[in-house]
């Protein structure tokens, strides 16, 4: 069977024909679907790079039985008017040749793929990974705020009528984007190896040691403002006079750091901040996390942030906003409203001042992250996608699955 996977993610490609991701979608992610389907076509956005471009900070997405269809962005009004016809025709031809569609939402390409699948009578499933409202309303422009209610309504409508829907949260996205008649599952899209007890012991030893700067870390793309990098910088600047000893702030993520460095300089903390670019997923990121003392995720939009769970799996004490599914991961005392600089600053002071608090949070986070190991989640994923595969083979008949229950 052949399935089309549709999302607005931007992949990088060159003359070799190989596609790369900024780290979120390596080839191993496609294996989740290839365990059930024979072939996968990725409908996405793309950016052509020079043949000699340095791709060391990106992960290879190309591999056996996976091909890519690059489409223009539909995320701005001009392209919606001038490019939609091309996108619709290309997606129609691609989906007509396939057996089913998997739309990762929210995304313009995903939404278009769902509409076309319904028109062609093709089975489809939705992956809900974030909230459309949060990204547009909490920290969008005036245009974004005006579009937010329509985006919320559109995404709710698309998910409501989906025959299959998988959510990365346990509660948040399900409540905001319910799928009352379809088969659903809750399964984070994180990929974590099982961490040994030595990881926690190493973290606890680090907490008890003194000396060196107190290092705060954040993982997130520098290209947008949804990860709250500016909130982090302002909160650190506000908290700095009360923080014990010297501090540093490290950011790991793709994109241009120029404007963030300028803001840090303006706030008087430019020399405390470093932007570390992109590292290959796995060991390199774990080593980076092991070198920080506190992880923060002051996001304006999230599903269930993989970076936060990965930090927790390394025993990192963690602070985060109440965006998306973050409250499902952290203690109430570790949360702040998106954009609330003063609250985050107070939490930074408490975290840096109390080794006892950091030890308690390290043990709690390490234990909770164990529920998100690849081994455990792969079982849930396989059950869900195998059910969807049966649905596709049956010609889109849900009744054959009803004896197992409405939800996976």
Image (spheres, rainbow, N blue to C red):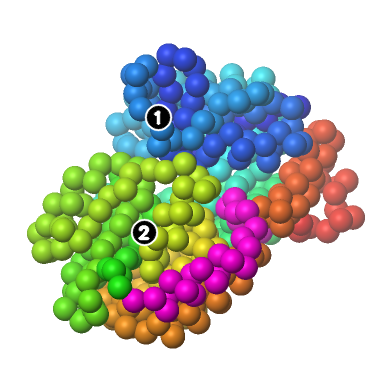
Residue that appears at 45% across and 61% down: 290
Tell me the tag on residue 55. 1
Q: Is residue 84 visible?
A: no
Circle 2 is placed at which residue position?
218
Q: Quick one: 165 or 262, which is closer to the camera? A: 262
Q: Tell me where residue 171 sits by quadrant.
A: bottom right
In the rendered image, residue 283, in percent from the top left (x then y), is placed at: 52, 48
Q: Residue furthest top?
A: 15
Does the magenta run of residues contain 198? yes
The N terminus is located in which quarter?
top right
**Residue 144 drawn above or below residue 372:** above
**Residue 267 drawn above or below residue 336:** above
Does the magenta run of residues contain 276? no
Q: Tell me where residue 142 sits by quadrant.
A: bottom left
Q: Secondary structure at mark 2?
A: strand
Left or right, residue 97 beside residue 237: right
Q: Which residues are magenta?
A: 184-210
In the rendered image, residue 230, in percent from the top left (x then y), is placed at: 24, 59
Q: Is residue 219 visible?
A: yes
The C terminus is located in which quarter?
bottom right
Distance of label 2 from label 1 (alpha carbons): 22 Å
Residue that appears at 44% across and 59% down: 289
Asked if the residue under mark 1 is in contact with the one under mark 2, i.e. CB atoms within 8 Å, the reply is no
Q: Quick one: 221 or 216, which is closer to the camera? A: 216
Q: Secondary structure at mark 1?
A: loop
Residue that appears at 42% across and 43% down: 279
In the rendered image, residue 329, in percent from the top left (x then y), is placed at: 53, 70
Left or right, residue 303 beside residue 57: right
**Residue 166 drawn above or below residue 205:** above
Q: Tell me where residue 403 sits by quadrant.
A: bottom right
Tell me the tag on residue 106. none
């Amino acid at each position: 069977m052949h399935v089309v996977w549709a999302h607005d993610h931007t992949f990088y490609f060159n003359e070799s024909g190989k596609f790369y991701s900024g780290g979120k979608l390596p080839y191993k992610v496609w294996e989740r679907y290839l365990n059930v389907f024979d072939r996968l076509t990725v409908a996405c956005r793309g950016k052509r790079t020079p043949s000699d471009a340095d791709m060391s900070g990106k992960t290879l997405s190309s591999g056996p039985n996976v091909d890519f269809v690059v489409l223009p962005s539909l995320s701005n009004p001009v392209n919606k008017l001038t490019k939609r016809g091309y996108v619709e025709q290309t997606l129609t031809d691609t989906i007509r040749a396939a057996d089913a569609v998997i739309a990762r939402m929210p995304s313009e390409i995903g939404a278009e793929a769902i509409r076309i699948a319904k028109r062609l009578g093709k089975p489809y499933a939705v992956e809900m990974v974030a909230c459309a409202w949060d990204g547009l309303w909490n920290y969008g422009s005036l245009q974004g705020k005006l579009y937010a209610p329509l985006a919320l309504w559109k995404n709710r409508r698309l998910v409501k009528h989906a025959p299959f829907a998988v959510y990365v949260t346990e509660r948040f996205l399900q409540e905001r984007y319910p799928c009352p008649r379809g088969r659903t599952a809750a399964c984070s899209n994180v990929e974590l190896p099982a961490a040994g007890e030595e990881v926690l012991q190493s973290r606890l030893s680090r907490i008890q040691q003194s000396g060196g700067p107190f290092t705060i870390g954040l993982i997130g793309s520098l290209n947008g403002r949804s990860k709250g990098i500016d909130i982090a910088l302002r909160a650190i600047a506000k908290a700095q006079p009360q923080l014990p000893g010297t501090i540093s702030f490290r950011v790991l993520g793709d994109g241009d750091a120029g404007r963030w460095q300028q803001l840090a300089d303006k706030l008087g903390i430019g020399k405390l901040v470093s932007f570390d670019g992109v590292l290959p997923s796995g060991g390199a990121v774990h080593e980076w996390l092991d070198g920080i003392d506190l992880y923060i995720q002051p996001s304006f939009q999230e599903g269930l942030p993989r970076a936060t769970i990965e930090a927790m799996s390394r025993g990192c004490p963690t602070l985060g906003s109440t965006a998306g599914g973050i409250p499902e991961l952290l203690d109430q005392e570790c949360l702040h409203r998106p954009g609330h600089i003063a609250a985050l600053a107070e939490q930074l002071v408490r975290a840096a001042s109390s080794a006892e608090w950091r030890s308690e949070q390290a043990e709690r986070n390490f234990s909770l992250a164990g529920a998100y190991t690849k081994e455990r989640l792969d079982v849930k994923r396989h059950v869900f996608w195998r059910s969807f595969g049966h649905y596709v083979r049956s010609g889109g008949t849900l009744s054959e699955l009803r004896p197992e229950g409405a939800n996976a």
